[in-house]
Image: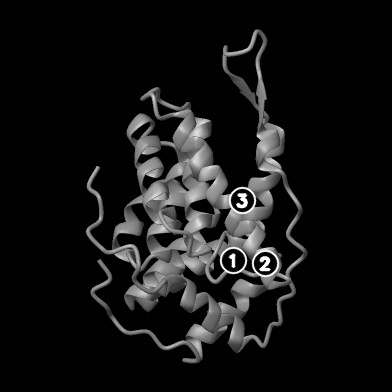
Amino acid sequence: MKKPAAPMSQPKAFALLSVLFLCLCCTTLHAAEYGQYDPKRLLTPKEPAGTGATLDLVYLDSIMADLRQHAGTYPPSFDSPADMQRAQHDAGYLIGLFKAMFSSGGAPPPHMLLRMALLGSAAHNLDARGGADFAQTYFQKLLQADPDHAAGNYHYGIFLASTGRAKDALRYLLKAKAKGMTPALYGLGMSYLQLGDTAKALENLLAYQQAEPKDSTVAMLIEAIRSGKIETQRTNAQ
């Protein structure tokens, strides 16, 4: 699998389109408080001592869900700077924990590879050092192990688009679409919009609207594109 050559620090163009759209809609977002977690609770030593530890997946998924609620997209949204600092700390701790857990070279199972990739993506959105590389590494490991992994293709496509690599994202979002991942239609619409292809953007956004008629935001986005409130131009976005 070819690793995109684009630097990880480039502006998050995909996300900026979303921000622009939200501004057009005059929507004010209020983030819920980010939870108080103790990541040290994640590992419970096995008996007898020295035989390893058990990872609490339920607690892990609680932290991950909260991180993704606040930092699943860029820019992250928090109730206060203190909340964001806690989230940054938790993301950094988890990345360090997983690096230590799998440092011996053992391959994590696919469900862990996806969790680790999503963690890296959230860490990247939090501007945490190493988050993008962590996400890139584990998305690729997941898709090397299972090239047809529907959620893996979808989330990797979104990650690529959010880091300014919309052209690279299309391959994965199209595969996710073929696997029945309805949100991939929205991702494709935004990616094509980033690339300046309004016709394909509208084609996918209209398909998403048909699949998710209760999502009122996509109707506003479609109208904004058609009315010229969102202008696009072709770019060389990887």
Q: Label 1, on which residue?
A: 209
Front-most of residues 66 and 200: 66
- Helix or strand or loop: what does disc 1 sit on? helix
Front-most of residues 48 and 26: 48
Q: Amino acid at mark 2?
A: Asp
Where 106 falls versus 14 (above or below)? above
Where 153 falls versus 158 (above or below)? above
Label 2 neighbour load within 10 Å: few <14, some 14-19, many 20+: few
Q: Label 3, on which residue?
A: 90
Q: Residue furthest front?
A: 49
Q: Quadrant of the N terminus?
A: top left
Q: CA distance from mark 1 to mark 3?
A: 36 Å
Q: CA distance from mark 1 to mark 2?
A: 7 Å
Residue found 60% across the figure and 55% down from its top? 89
Residue found 55% across the figure and 81% down from its top? 21
Q: Label 2, on which residue?
A: 215
